[in-house]
Image (spheres, rainbow, N blue to C red):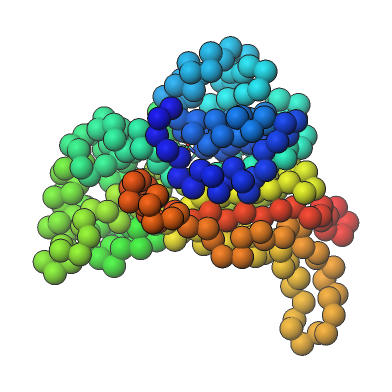
Amino acid sequence: MNHVPVLFKESIDLLEPTPGKVIVDCTLGRGGHTKGFLDSGAKVIGFDQDIEAIQEVVESYQLKKVSDEPLIYQNDQLIVVHANFSKISTVLAKLEILEVDSIFWDLGVSSPQFDNPSRGFSYRFDAKLDMRMDQTQDVSAWDIVNTCELDQLTTIIREFGEERYARRIARQIVSDRPIDTTFELTETIKKAMPARALAEQHPAKRTFQAIRIAVNNELAALEDSLESGLRHLKLGGRLGVISFHSLEDRIVKEFFKKKQDPCTCPKTIPYCVCGKKPTIKIITRKPIVPATLETEENRRAHSSKLRVAEKISEFKEVGK
Ligand SMILES: C[S@@+](CC[C@H](N)C(=O)[O-])C[C@H]1O[C@@H](n2cnc3c(N)ncnc32)[C@H](O)[C@@H]1O
């Protein structure tokens, strides 16, 4: 494992892995952060929906298979699970674990996924449109690009890519279909954009991000797992999330804010009558960003932000 994980030291310091603790690493990847947690003496339960990532970690730690559905491997200190992190509750139930000490997400695509041309994530390589993190999933980028209606495509590109030219690009896609490869899609996007926009950043960047988010249902999975993760966290336990773009960061920021300040009473009432109490305390008032050196050495680090919160109470709504 010779790549340097993003915001590595900061994540390890703030998630406080110590001997006896159980940390959930929702995004195992090649196990970079997990190695840090293990080296600090904690036990780790690692999730990844990418079977290649799971296989690599299984091999490097010589883990034994203990379940087929979901696929689970383990040794004394590490359990790895081939599953979407939105299934955190189901998997912890299967492992007969009620509570954990910290939960960590290092979101997005891993370098091995981006750099493997055949996975179809990158506009740098020509490949069949794919972009599935979970290779067992049916829907791929090809399906989104070739079967979505114009309005659906526009919404995906606008909302998940924050792309100003979403409508034009969607129209061009519909007119050029079938589009089979990453290079064909890039050409279509370029045709749709005004000349002045081509010079700003890579013209395909936002549309590729949008389609990838749609294929992997990334934002809904993050929202679900934050909610269920918090339910399984011990009091005093921590949630830590590294995000890579504003859509992810907004979800984390708003989730933390809502759980730290859930009171829904009108501001005109001088005291709280809704009874909703904070369940977390935000530890990182501002998100932690990498030092300049890290961004120079690691392309992925550029837009990364780490937010951490600590669970301070269990809140049950009245009547539940
Ligand atoms: C940025 S990489 C993690 C890198 C890792 N922290 C390391 O140090 O090697 C993100 C990983 O999370 C996985 N992933 C992303 N979304 C997921 C989800 N919803 N469920 C499970 N795994 C997911 C991806 O397949 C990828 O391997």
- Rendered position, 128 above or below 260: above
Q: Quadrant of residue 201?
A: bottom left
| Residue for point 62% across, 24% down | 78
- 265 relative to 86, above or below: below
**Where does the image place residue 149, in percent across and percent down from the top left?**
31, 53
Q: Can you say which quadrant of the picture contains the N terminus?
A: top left
Judged left or right of residue 279, residue 166 is: left
Identify the residue at horizontal 61%, vertical 60% (top origin).
284
127, 3: nearer the viewer? 3
Residue 68 placement (x, y as % from top left): 58, 16
Q: Is residue 244 left or right of residue 208?
A: right
Q: Specify whether residue 83 is in view.
A: no
182 horizontally vs 138: left or right: left
Is 124 situated above or below 160? above
Residue occupying the point 74% across, 73% down: 264
Instruction: Farthest residue to the right: give it.
Output: 319
Give residue 136's quadrant in the image: top left
Count of labels in the image? 0
